[in-house]
Image (cartoon, helix red, strand yellow):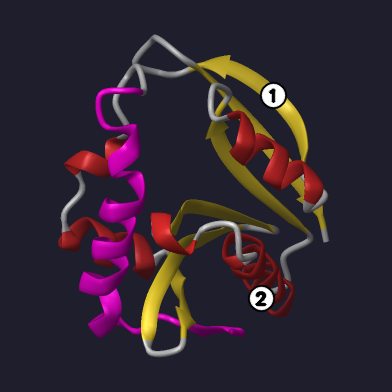
Amino acid sequence: MAVRLRIASADDAPLVYQIMQAAFEEYRGVLNPPSGVHAETVDDVIRAMQEGGAVLAWLGDQAVGSARYAFHGKSCYIGRVSVLPQARGQGIASAMMTYIEGIAREHGCTWMEIAVREVLESNVRLYERLGYRVTEVYEHPSGGSMVVTMVKTL
């Protein structure tokens, strides 16, 4: 089944939130410090979407993925890439990343940026396969795990 993508509207914020919460649930009690996702509200998602936007991914009539993006000058930051566990391994995250890269190009961005916990090795490998390269490794601001910043030139 083909993945269908679209930009999320403000009315879609609760769905973006729901997918994000479900996708990040596996990290509860695993990441140190805990992911900030677990403290977010729908209002937080709305505010984040106002800085750029969000996309939704669908398989058939089911929304299975979401990701947010924000513009910062010539860069576009991608965050909260989320795919429901039962839909993983079907190229949904890759499709959302590529879709957002297209939006960023249209917006005049020349590079993309994403931050990911170093311990989430499969996520780091995914972004590397998509052409992102580690440009910085630093300790999470709250201590604990290391975070990598990854960048891709458009």
Which residue occupies 54% across, 22% down?
A: 119
Disc nearest the viewer among 1 and 2: 1
Q: Where is residue 128 in the image (x, y as percent from the top left)?
A: 77, 42
Q: Which mark is residue 72?
A: none
- How many numbered dots are placed on residues in this image? 2
Above or below: residue 105 compared with residue 38: below
Which residue occupies 36% across, 81% down?
A: 62
On the picture, is 85 further left or further right than 123? Answer: left
Q: Is residue 126 magenta?
A: no
Question: Which image quadrant for residue 86?
Answer: bottom left
Going by the numbered disc 1, the residue's amino acid type is: Glu
The tag earlier along the polypeptide, 1 or 2, is 2
Q: Which mark is residue 136?
A: 1
Q: Residue 107 carries which label?
A: 2
Q: Where is residue 148 in the image (x, y as percent from the top left)?
A: 62, 27
Above or below: residue 18 compared with residue 37: below
Say which quadrant the C terminus sits in: bottom right
Going by the numbered disc 2, the residue's amino acid type is: His
Asked if the residue under mark 2 is in contact with the one under mark 1, i.e. CB atoms within 8 Å, the reply is no
Q: Position of residue 7 (x, y in %)?
A: 47, 82
Looking at the picture, tell me which residue is in the foreground, 85 or 135. Answer: 85
On the picture, is 2 further left or further right than 127? Answer: left
What is the crowding at mark 2: few (fewer than 14 residues within 10 Å), some, or many (at least 20)? Answer: some
SS category of the residue bearing label 2 = loop
Q: Give the CA separation, mark 1 to mark 2.
A: 25 Å
Which residue occupies 56% across, 37% down?
A: 115
Q: Is residue 3 magenta?
A: yes
Q: Where is residue 134 in the image (x, y as percent from the top left)?
A: 75, 31
Q: Give the range drawn in magenta.
A: 1-30
On the picture, is 132 further left or further right than 75? Answer: right
The furthest residue to the top? 144
